[in-house]
Every structure is written in C-alpha cells, then in structure tokens.
Amino acid sequence: MKWLLTVPFVVVLSLTVMAFVGLFNFDEAGFDWSVLDDAYFHQIVIFSLGQGLLSALVSVLLAWPIARSLYFIKSLPLKKTFLSLCILCFVMPTLVLITGLVALLGRSGWLSPYISQWIFTDWNLYGLSGILLAHVYLNMPLAVRVFYIQLQGIADSSWKLSRQLKLTRWQRLRWIEWPVLKPSIIMLFGFVFILCFNSFAVVLALGGGPQSTTLEVAIYQSLKYDFNIAEALIFAWAQLLIAGAFFILVARLGSPVWLSVDSNDSYWTPAMKGWRKTLLVCIYSAAFAFLLLPVLAIFPGIMELSWQKLNLQMYLKPAVITVTLGCIAAGVGVLFAYFLLLPIRHAHVRKQSKKQVLLEWLATHALLAPTMVVSVGLFVLLLPLVSLDDWGIVMVVVLNSAIVVPFAVQKLKPRLLQFDAQYGSLIRSLKLQKIDIWRIEWPFIRPVCLSTFALILVLAMGDVAIFSIFGNSDWKTLPWLIYEFAGSYRLAEASLASLILLCLCAACLWLVEWRSFQFAASSGHRMISEPAQIHEVCIKNA
C-alpha cells in the first residue's frame, strides 16, 4: 500500500511535466528567437523588473511604521478589524480592488480632481502609478502582519533591560527592533517582488498601453490576441527563468508567517507618549483609510444602477460558477495536501532530513512556475489534442487545484507535525488501526483544515490568469464578469459584481479568523481531551 503515497506526487508532477512539454514545443510553432533582439521585448523585461522592485520596496518601507504603531500602541481603535482587513486585502480578488480604484481615482473618480490639484498636473491612474498603487495595496498588508508578528517576538525583558540601561530611542531601534526584523526583511522583499513580477490582472486592467506591459500580459496578448505561439513561448520562458531564480533565492530564506492569530497583547513595551504617539496614531489612521477607501468606493457605483431593469440572473450564474469551481479546487487542494504530507511526516519522524526536504520541494514546486507560464504550456500541448472550448472549464478546475496545493501544504504541515510530535510515539506503541488514528487525528487538525479550505477557496475564486487562457463565455466567473464590465466602462455593473465577490471572500475569511480564535480559546481543553480520546479508542480495541 505504500505505493499509494506516491500517487499524489505523480499527479501533481505530471501537470508540470506536461506544461514543460508544451513549453518545449518544437513542432509547428517552435521558438521565435528573433524576439530576444526585439526592443519591445527588452522594454517589457525592464518594465516587469522595475515595477516589481519598486512595488516591493514601497510596500516593505510603508509597512514598517504601520507595524510599529500596532505594536507600541495596544489601545488602537478597531485594531483587530484592521488586522482582519489586512488578510482580506492580501487575498482580495484583484479585479475587486481595481473596480474600487477606478471608482476612487479613475478619470471621473471621487479623488481625481483633488489629486490633480495636489500634484499640480493631470492625474492618470493608468500606467505605472496605478500599477504601483494597486500592488502596494495588495502586498503592504502582508508586510505589516509579518513585521507585527516579528515584533511580538521581542522578549519583555529586553525592553525592561533597555530602560534600566537608559538606552536612547535610536539605540533601542538598533539593538532590539532591528535584529528581530532583519532576518525577514530580505525574504519579505523577495517574496513581494515575485508576487508583483507575476502580477497579471493589475497590469492587464491598469497598464494603459504597450509602454506599461509586463511579461505576464505579453504572454496573454501573444496567445489570445495575436495567436503567436512562438512569441508566447519565448515570453513564457523568460518569465519562468526570472521568476524561478528569485523564487529559489527566497525559498532558501524561508517563507513569511502572517496568518497566525494576533490575540497576544500581553507583551510589555515602553510607554509611547507625546508627539511620537500622535504620529503613530496618524500613520495607523492613514493606513486604515488607505485600505478601506477602495472598498467603500464600490458602493456609490451600485446606487447608480436601475434596479427595475437589473437582470440578477446575469450575476447569479457567474456567482454559482465561481463558488462551485472554488470549492472543488479548494477541496481537492486540501485533500492532495494532506496525502502529500504523509510521506513528508514519515521522513520527519525517521529524521530523514534530506528526504523530507526533497519531498517538500516536490509538493510545493508549483510555486516555482508562474500561473500564466504553466497555463501557456498546457494550452500549447493540448490545443491539437482536445477541444479546449469543451474541456477548458475542466482545465480551469485542474490548474486552480494544482496552484493552491502548495499553500495548503504550508498551512497544514505545522499542525500535522505537531500532532506527530505529541502523540506519534504513543500511537505507534499502541499499534492502532488507520481508522482509529484518523478518529484521533481529525479533531486535532479540523480547525486548521477548515481555515485552510477557506483561505485557498478565496485564492481560487479570485483567479483571472487561468480563466483568461482556458475560460469561455459560457462559463463566466465573477472576476471575468467584472473585467468585461470594467472594459466596457459599465462601472455600476462592475461595482455590483465586485461587491458580491467581496462579500463571498469576506465570509470565507471570517471563517479563518473565527476558527483561529476559537481554536486559541479552546486549546487548553483540547490538550486534556485528546489523551482521553486515545484512551477511549484503546479500550474499544481491547
């Protein structure tokens, strides 16, 4: 039966192998090597790198003072709401944000006239300014939570000792805060850069022209508009090599931990008074407004709708399709992640570190290749073999499931390894059956399984890149419906579709926070009940 443990790895790896077979297509299309000497290709690569580096730099720099305000001032109003909003912003479907930004800062947006007065020139959301703004909105909350969690790790004794030694604020920053934040800064910068470099929907909607095109969008345009497979393959390989190199570098530094529960406010810090406290409160308030305004900007557009002429069926079918496809992808993702972790757990128990590292890399290798690159490889491979008009929706489900598996693996792994560390030896000594082990294990991992399902459900529901390649008009999802409405300047309809999608995502993320806090509150009871469950199972077996 051990061979069954290899099945999930074979399935996950086969998709990547098939994608690479498509990327190595030498038959009819081959590679158009002349693209490498084209000035347009050079411009795309330079802009892709430039906007990614700039977006990552701004996101990390702005996150630091916001995290300090959260850490040093425990009595901030709506602090937990802000931290929950940070999660929502990071995993928010991109087109929901774009709809809010267009309503807020577009050509006829609320704030556009005022911004033009402040900067003494005509404000234009489309181009580098809009791309940078959207990327900072999506990725700065991640950096805020990472820095905040890192700061919470500072021991109370460090602050008390600094007060006894009468260290200045600069010395506290240098000797206490900086050593805690330093290990995560480079890793976080690289991780945010990869997210921005692989960004698709933001650049597609806010790029504003060829001068603001990235490799992801160039791949899509070459494949769907020009049907130039040879050019799309060159763009895909350039995207893969650059993103892959940065991913390998970041993976060696670790992965950001940002979804843990932020309920521990029992730490001690020096009192913040006077203008410094006022400054931190102002920074927090500005950040809260920055994250909240694009969401609130969706509502006025909805008021412009003619509700008598509104066809709700136009929204109902895409909403059902979005939730259905997302649930299938999330369910398959959690299931595959659990079975992928079984051999990893065995290697961990047997202290086979090299085998464990290899298996973890195989389980999460899908992060290495950008979504658009994998989609293009499979599209080129399957185009002469099957009718993608009929089977495209199946590929959307399959690829979305494969893309979310690495996130599920990273979320489930700590809890499963904790279970093995606490009860693995006892279970092995009792020689329990598989079904009995599962009866004990499931209550232990159920909260994290539910929160993982909700998180990757939101990620799957917000997909645009995969649908742009394999989707069709008969199976529209809410994100693609938003894109079509926004592209035809039907902002009122786009706002309503965005609100529906946002409410669905917020409900899922509420489940993440609620289950997390519930688990934290009942952890003491669980530590007592689990040995009792083991004892009960043993008695029944006897």
Image: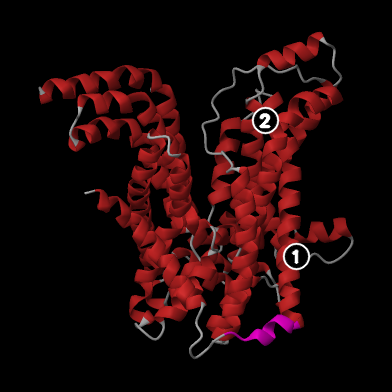
| Nearer-the-camera pick, 294 or 59 | 59
- Residue shown at 37% from the left, 81% from the top: 389
Q: Give the answer, above or below, for where 20 lies relative to 456.
A: below
Q: Quadrant of residue 129?
A: bottom right
For mark 2, give the secondary structure. Answer: helix
Question: In the displayed structure, would residue 235 be above or below residue 332?
Answer: below
Q: Amino acid at mark 1?
A: Leu
Disc ID at residue 128: 1
Location of mark 2 (residue) = 70
**Label 1 element class:** helix
Q: Is residue 247 above or below residue 44?
A: above
Q: Pick the residue in front: 174 or 295.
A: 174
Q: How many marks?
A: 2
Q: Residue at x 54, y 86 (%)?
A: 30
User: What are the residue bounds of the magenta stretch?
Assistant: 31-38
- Between disc 1 and disc 2, whose residue precedes? 2
- Predominant SS along the magenta part: helix
Amino acid found under the numbered disc labelled 2: Leu
